[in-house]
Amino acid sequence: MIRNEKELKSKLNQLISDSDFLRLQESFEKQSLFQLLGFGHRETMHSSFISWLLSPTSSLNLGTFPLKRFLYYICEENVSNAKTIIDFDLIESGSLQLEEMEVATEVSESAVDPETNQELRARFDLCLTNDLVKIIVENKVLARENKDQTETYMKILKQLDDSYTYELKVFLSPDATTKPKCPEFIQIDYQGLYDFVIVPCLNHPKITTANKNILEEYIHNLRMVYKGVNKPMARVNDELCVAIYDKYKDVLDEIFDAVKNETPEKRTAKMSSPIRKSNISWKELYSRLNEDEKNLETTYGGAVREAEIDLISGKVLFEGKEYSSPSAAAIAAVNSVKGANYTERYNGYALWSIVYPNGDKKKLSDVRDDIAASLAQEEED
């Protein structure tokens, strides 16, 4: 407990002079090597880095250790809690021949859909194969899944003349609420990649100084806020933050108590390239949503209002009536609280949030930004 102003100033001086605090502060101020080169959060860069990280023959020189950690994360700790026929014992047994695994990026495949006789095309961001195992990774960084993308990939995989004993389909994204449309894809995120793969490699006794520096630069890149979402790809400073808090709990609690009723300014995202503003239509947005993203909710005047998006027509259903857009439904929702004669316009993207099956919520405006970023990324690629 801080007893007076003099003690508070003394504690603050100790805090801002502390080596851990200075290290944390520096991590916010400097750019990573990847950002300086101009591709801090480019999807292809992340895929290439992961390929290098997981390949048993890469210059990382840790053999199958990173690949085993990755498989463990996919099969035992994945975000979707999916069960697979590969488990910890099998991974560590040596029978999967992981030392022979080849890792490739941007692998193109095609097949004819037997139902429609149309040619289907796919470009797998990561493809890991040996004689027994095939792992396909769909990596989404700034983009969302294109309409039915993972379902199309699944159709192609079923048509390929492969005979693998074990086949895993993986969906990787920094946002755990961005889910694959095909349920056969196992969902993982960059936080898990950091926790279960990168950190163990960083602490491996055989890691060289040069490779440790590369991993640390990538970790710093994961910490940077990425566009469309005001949060990092992974929380990499948790341990350091807890250590600082434990040492200076009194002064930090004093600060938190003083500002807890104020809204802090949003962090400014450090980007590797300027954000391109992109306005997309309601049709472009709803056509890219999936069944887990059709339920809307808002709280206005203390009252909770719910709505549902028809993913075919784009109509928003609120209290038994259909509305042409989120904003039209927002006006109706506000009027249901304030009265039918209340005519002020409302931004439906700011008012409504998508409610996911697990209870997570995300502003419709943030989802729109994600999709706009995805479209911009597609054009750039």
Image: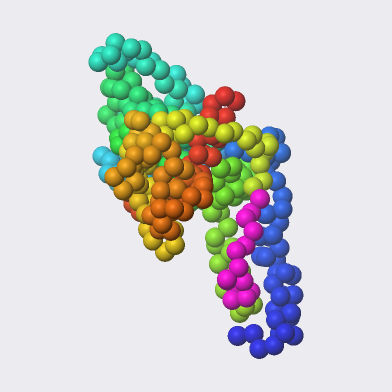
Instruction: Please tell me which residue is depicted at 62% across the width and 55% down the height of the picture.
Output: 266
Image quadrant occupied by the N terminus: bottom right
Above-or-below relation of 90 to 381 = below
Above-or-below relation of 296 to 3 = above
Q: Residue furthest front?
A: 341
- Residue 187's image quarter? top left
Position of residue 358 measured from the top left corner of the image (x, y, whole percent): 33, 51
- Residue 213's image quarter? top right
Q: Could you tell me if residue 133 is visible in this image? A: no
Q: Residue furthest top?
A: 117
Label tally: 0
Position of residue 312 measured from the top left corner of the image (x, y, whole percent): 34, 30
Q: Nearer the viewer, residue 293 or 150?
A: 293
Instruction: Please tell me which residue is depicted at 44% across the width and 30% down the height of the picture.
Output: 283
Name the side, left or right, on which 53 lies relative to 358: right
Q: Nearer the viewer, residue 335 or 183?
A: 335
Above-or-below relation of 148 to 50 = above
Q: Could you tell me if residue 85 is visible in this image? A: yes
Position of residue 267 measured from the top left corner of the image (x, y, whole percent): 64, 54
Q: Is residue 264 magenta?
A: yes
Q: Is residue 344 magenta?
A: no
Position of residue 242 measured from the top left corner of the image (x, y, whole percent): 55, 67
Q: Main secondary structure of the magenta part?
A: loop
The magenta stretch spans which residues? 255-268
Instruction: Please tell me which residue is depicted at 33% across the width and 36% down the height of the picture.
Output: 310
Instruction: Please tell me which residue is depicted at 44% across the width and 42% down the height of the picture.
Output: 328
Name the side, left or right, on which 16 lies relative to 138: right
Q: Residue furthest bottom?
A: 3
Image quadrant occupied by the C terminus: top right
Q: Nearer the viewer, residue 257 or 245?
A: 257
